Amino acid sequence: MVQNAPVRSRTERTWDNYGKINRRNGINSGIRKGIALFLTGVLLVLSSCKESEKDKKRYLPDSVGAINSLAVVIDNEMWKGEVGDEIRNYYAAPVDGLPSVEPLFTLHQIPPSVFNGSTTKSRNILLVQKDTTTGSGIKTDTFARPQKIGVVKAPDNGELIALIAKTSDKYIREFKDNDVKENQKRFLTSENKETYLQQKFGIALTMPSVYKTAKQEDNFIWIERMISKGTMNVFVYELPLNSIPDDSTRVDAFIKMHDSIGKKYVPGREKGMYMITQKAYAPYIFDITLAGKPTMETKGMWEMKNFAMAGPFINYIITDKENDRLLVLEGLTFAPSEDKRDYMFELESILKSIRFTGK
């Protein structure tokens, strides 16, 4: 016989339901507290990571070293042998377009045993070492800022040599770009504030204040810097959009154009003297991008017609379709009996700082 359950009062049922609700709420509250504590921990970890990254960036010292210098961290024996020869073959190769042989970089060897403290602060570093594995890559701002470290590691000399050859183009480009940016940053400490380029051509160049506008004509601006034994010069002018063909004839077309500009705007001391492209050395021509626009880069030698005067130049012809023109930037140096690599690299850094501002 089944007995009936005792009848419970409404008050008893109400208190019983309240207890269940409290127990369920207590469980849910515990879960919520646990989730909240977990999320708080995650946020603290993430924020501490972000802070450590910020601290690393904040406290990195400034990198050091002359422009166009490269620290090579490598064992003494490898530096003196075939591995060192391969490094020199690429990183100390002659610079294109100079009248005498000057290396891409001035190399400074550092043995791994002394690569610590101040020796790690070089702006550009090539790290070559023997390792059980083969690997390469660029590290950015590891010990200082700005800094680029090109790593080459392999088990033996043969593989190191092959990897040096394989990575050299990329590493040289990274190191040179790093030096261009460093040069441009240094220009800002005493910057030229003239506005002639913006008014006439709708552009701006970052350059030191020692550069002064020396000549203005309808389609030509000449900016000059006096140096101890000569001058450094920047020319800016415009050409019709399709005046330099993009085919096998463009070298001849460039020389013809370049000579005509020299005859019109860059005269010598006497009548019949003017700047022309030196014919004894064919100019080097490359296709690059400058300020986001297709650009023809030309490096070569100029000379003064009917006068013993010459030097290197670098020329950029930018295809500026938005303004229906070719915009030409040129830098050239006259510094007899002096090395010219660093002068020309300063001019390159100035020209590569171009910004289109509009008139």
Image (cartoon, rainbow, N blue to C red):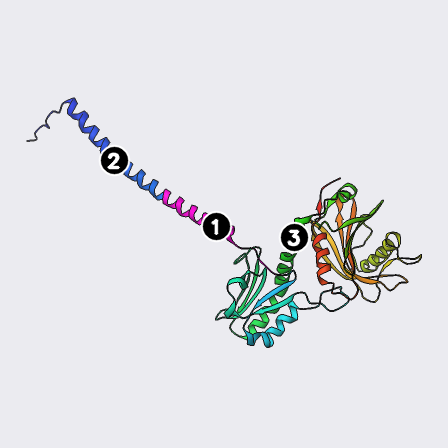
Whole-percent x and y of residue 19? 20, 31
* Residue to which mark 1 is pinned: 55
Does the stretch in magenta take in 54?
yes
For the residue carrying disc 1, how many other residues have a C-alpha within 10 Å: few (<14), some (14-19), or many (20+)?
few
Cβ atoms under marks 3 and 1 closer than 8 Å:
no
Q: Quadrant of the C terminus?
A: top right
Q: Is residue 284 visible?
A: yes
Decide which of 288, 84 is in the foreground and name it: 84
- Looking at the rendered structure, the secondary structure element under dot 2 is helix
Q: Earlier in the sequence, mark 2 or mark 3?
A: 2
Q: Residue at x 80, y 62 (%)?
A: 311
- Amino acid type indicated by mark 2: Gly
* Residue segment shown in magenta: 40-65
Q: Quadrant of the N terminus?
A: top left
- Amino acid type indicated by mark 3: Arg
Residue 230 as seen in the image, left or right of residue 169: right
- Looking at the rendered structure, the secondary structure element under dot 3 is helix
Q: Say the numbered circle drawn on residue 186.
A: 3
Q: Of discs 2 and 3, which sits in the foreground?
A: 3
Q: Say the numbered circle drawn on residue 26.
A: 2
